[in-house]
Image (tube, helix red, strand yellow):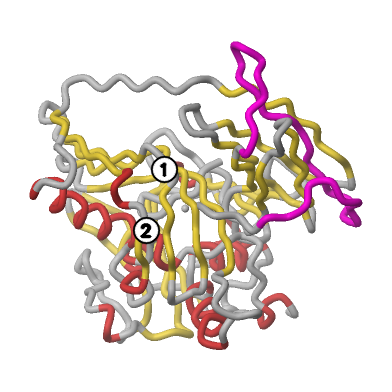
Amino acid sequence: MFRVQTITLVFLLFQAISIFGQTSTPFVVKGNVSDNETGETLPFASVFLANTTIGTVSNDKGDFILKVPKSGSYDLVIKFAGYRTFTRSIQFFEPQTFEVKAQLEVETRVVRGVTVTAKKDELWKRNLEDFKIGFLGTSAFAQQCKILNEEVLDFYFDEENNVFEAFASEPLIIENRALGYRLKYVLEGYYVFHTEKYSSYWGYPSYEELRGDRKPKSSWLRNREVAYLGSPDHFFGSLFHNRLKEEGYIVQMAKDVDGMRYLDKAELDLYQFVKPGSTENSKRLEFENILYVTYTKELIPREMGVTVDVTGVPVSGNKQRSHFFLLEGKSFIEFEQNGYVYNPLDYLVSDYWGVEKMGDLMPIDYVNTRTANK
């Protein structure tokens, strides 16, 4: 399961926690990290649950323990320099301990038919600026994000297929001064498809609180709530509990016919398309055509400087509006009660959600006290 924004759809320095102490949580992941060919253990490998604040490093013998505070579905990610990213999907339905023997493979990368840009020349710098817009976004919060290790990025352009690609030799370290997080993002793919006119990226993020104070600043707490409310996570979490209307969402169906887009002005009861998921913790949204989502409880900030009405479909004043649809060959979106989508590569988002990317992304273990008490 990946985390993606637009299409979407994040990474870092982990808060060190003891991996040997007694645990009071009923959900535990423990294991060992080694080289799959030599069997040699790999000390100080990054071990984390993607899109959360839960992470550690393996000890000098390659052992690790993660304590998980609550049930749910998670992506266990293990990263060691020079090796392929190890991932394992883990689901906690009841108290238990997962044991993982992570045997990492040496990473080899072969690139054909592309032009490689030299680092730090003018073309590289222009590509870097384009990447930051496509990856961090253009929101007010994205303006306060900084990639601390830009030098690990390289860029490729496939002239034959008109596709731009970015990759990082190491996890990207991102400091978000607006939300009070430092992230480590294992970038697995970043593509701009110029002919098809869309972009996609995916990877595995981990979050750490910035250490400016003993507790998060009040501005960080306010901004986190702003970033969460109206987001895809908030939307799918509200849909899971059939609370879209109460949480401020209006959903409408649109259809493309002969190059024209027609919007049904009637409000859609989206929950009628929700079915049981593949696990007891998940549900599926099965639909056709295009869904427009308007969030009514937060106005579009003027400082964003973006036009949400990119399709010519009328919007209601300055309310946030986004739209999304399933990609070819996909028939549903599967998600959990916290809004976590199992495979964000199943669908494409645009408009407001397309503007809010890494700069506005929140960990899935974030708890908004206002919505959690309902």
Compare marks 1 and 2 and give the one earlier in the sequence: 2
Magenta stretch bounds? 16-44
Percent x, y of residue 204: 51, 46
Please say whether residue 246 is visible from this viewpoint: no
Instruction: Name the residue furthest top.
Output: 37
Which mark is in front, 1 or 2? Answer: 2
Which dot marks residue 226?
none
Percent x, y of residue 222: 53, 85
Q: Residue at x 89, y 53 (%)?
A: 23
Residue 304, above or below 271: below
Near mark 2 (Cα within 10 A), the count class, few <14, some 14-19 or many ≥20, is few
Q: Quadrant of residue 34?
A: top right
Reading the image, the residue beneath label 2 is 148
- Looking at numbered disc 2 in the image, what kind of residue is underneath it? Leu
Q: Residue at x 66, y 44 (%)?
A: 57
Residue 331 included in the magenta stretch of the image: no
Q: Residue at x 16, y 47 (%)?
A: 120
Q: CA distance from mark 1 to mark 2?
A: 15 Å
Percent x, y of residue 264: 36, 67
Reading the image, the residue beneath label 1 is 187
